[in-house]
Amino acid sequence: MRWYVSIGAVLVAGAIAGGDVAGIAAPNAVNQSSARSAEKENAATVDVELVLAVDVSYSMDLDELAVQREGYAQAIVSKQFLQALKSLPNGKISITYFEWAASNDQKIIIPWRVIDGPETADAVADEILKTPIRRASRTSISGAIYFALPLFEANPYRGLRQVIDISGDGPNNNGAPILPAREAALVKGITINGLPIMVKEPSLSTMDIENLDWYYEDCVIGGPGSFVVAIKDREKFNEAIRTKLLLEVAGLTPDRPVVPVAEKEPRVSCLIGEKIWQDRWGR
């Protein structure tokens, strides 16, 4: 079951490669893959492997990008987050943070790091804030998901749960369609959560759509306990990000979901971004 969450609707306390193109792996590749798997099995256990995938497309203005970065940094060092971390069985998570735009444009800002208390949280937050802000063209949520998948395999820390946390302010309009990308994550047991950013009125001159939260609910998120936290007020950025990270770390879904996700036909076409782009630019 997947749920949609409005900001302020929940209060969370601490609770808890290789082979040939024919598909036949070469012996060395098999050995290397087995070695990586064995190494990961023996690695230190974390409660969550969390990938933060952050939109930096041109539809995000510079102020939004700065507030978004600040929101993630402040959430990671917040008292509530650290309390939730202490309540977990192992008391630690591994986290990586990358920015994305087009299908071939992803940049890792924070490689895998373990957060197990205030010091490691401060170090990650500082690293997020000190990286220069950038912007890029197009929006490929599918590209972000496909980029995230091998990151879990490369993570030296074995997690009890694996989560991709995607923030963005528009639908997929570049690269592969979103649904096959989502399915590729779900078959691996990975949960996808969403943070649709809806602080601006949709404009005909942009790729904005109405009901972006519905699009994220029906087309992007998936997996056990997956949910959406929509940001509809610029002043709520920090609160929204903190709420979502608390839910993800604690492995919770809201006690009082606001709107259950549609289980059948999407309320918004999962190809709406591609259609808008085609209608406007013919390519």
Image (tube, rainbow, N blue to C red):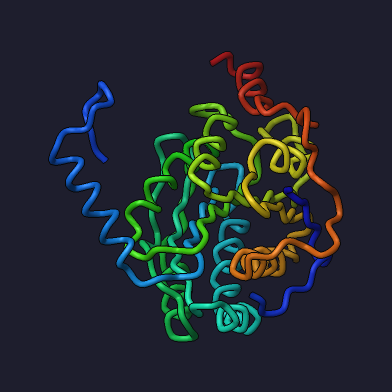
Q: Which residue does the image show at 82% across and 65% down from the upper left?
A: 255
Q: Quadrant of residue 111?
A: bottom left
Task: Residue at 14%, 37% (x, y): give it.
Answer: 27
Q: Which residue is the extreme one toward the top?
A: 282
Tell me: residue 268, above or below residue 11: above
91 and 117: which one is in front? 91
Q: Quadrant of residue 222?
A: top right
Question: 130 or 211, which is in the foreground?
Answer: 211
- Please tell me which residue is depicted at 69% across the width and 31% down the height of the picture: 205
- Image coords of residue 243 (percent x, y): 70, 67
Query: Is residue 139 visible from the viewing direction of this image?
Result: no
Q: Position of residue 248 (x, y in %)?
A: 61, 64
Q: Nearer the viewer, residue 182 or 281?
A: 182
Residue 281 drawn above or below residue 42? above
Taking depth in this image into account, of 216 and 204 the one nearest to the observer is: 216
Toward which corner of the image does residue 262 lie, by quadrant? top right
- Establish if 157 lies above or below 196: below
The answer to whether residue 179 is above or below residue 34 is: above
Look at the image and tell me whether residue 145 can be seen: yes
Spot occupied by residue 282 in the image (x, y as percentages of width and height):
58, 13
For this orientation, the residue located farthest to the left is 28
The residue located at (53%, 52%) in the rendering is 164
Q: How many numbered callouts?
A: 0
Residue 186 falls left or right of residue 11? left
